[in-house]
Image (tube, helix red, strand yellow):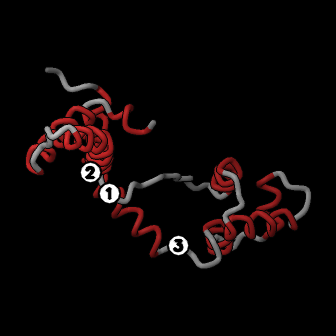
Amino acid sequence: MRTPVRLLALELFDQELPELKKAANSLRTHSPREGWVRGIRKSLGMSMLAFAHRMSFKVSASVNELERNELSGAITLETLRHAAEALEAEFVYAIIPRKSLGEMVAARARDVASRRMSPISKSMALEEQGLTKAQIERQIGELASELERKPEALWR
């Protein structure tokens, strides 16, 4: 049986995850206290007025607002891209999963399978056709394996 493209993509992403986590940790621990824009601007010796001109702002007060918004998290990605361009820098944006996507899908599949099996096993027990704990676990495992191959069904 062929592996679906989305599962191959998941595997490829997971292969890159350790390096992405390392980069994220480095960025987190080495971020300038005053924010990236102000930190780079000041390190370059660029005044607020010069930066405002490069950003096509009318007044340097807009630079102050931009730098405050970066620190508070209220800045847009587009503004950060524009600021990076004005600083002749690269803008990088990423969302790094805390654990591998494979682990996330497997855990979710197991959870969904357990929830689906619960009413079935209760109903069978009421009809005196109860399954042993090992049988229930095996059924949950088989259902979870099926669900892992179709992860779009896991997030409904």
**Residue carrying label 3:** 31
**Depth check, front residue: 123 or 153:** 123
Where residue 103 is drawn, which disc sits there? Answer: 2
Nearer to us: label 1 or label 3: 1
Secondary structure under the numbered disc 2 in the rendered image:
helix
Above-or-below relation of 15 to 53 = above
- Residue 14 picture location, percent across and down: 28, 47
Direction from residue 125 to residue 43 in the image, left or right: right
- Residue 151 picture location, percent across and down: 33, 34
Say which residue appears at 28% left-offset and 50% top-offset.
107
Secondary structure under the numbered disc 1 in the rendered image:
loop
Figure quadrant of the N terminus: top left
Above-or-below relation of 83 to 120 = below
User: Separation of disc 2 and disc 1 at Cα?
Assistant: 7 Å
**Depth check, front residue: 7 or 76:** 7
User: Separation of disc 1 and disc 3 at Cα?
Assistant: 23 Å
- Residue 129 picture location, percent across and down: 14, 38
Amino acid carrying mark 2 in the image: Glu
Say which residue appears at 33% left-offset and 64% top-offset.
22
Q: Earlier in the sequence, mark 1 or mark 3?
A: 3
- Residue 58 picture location, percent across and down: 91, 56
**Residue carrying label 1:** 99
Above-or-below relation of 146 to 105 = above
Amino acid carrying mark 1 in the image: Lys
| Contact flag, marks 2 and 1 (Cβ < 8 Å) | yes
**Is residue 57 visible to us here?**
yes
| Contact flag, marks 3 and 2 (Cβ < 8 Å) | no
Secondary structure under the numbered disc 3 in the rendered image:
loop
- The outermost residue toward the bottom is 33
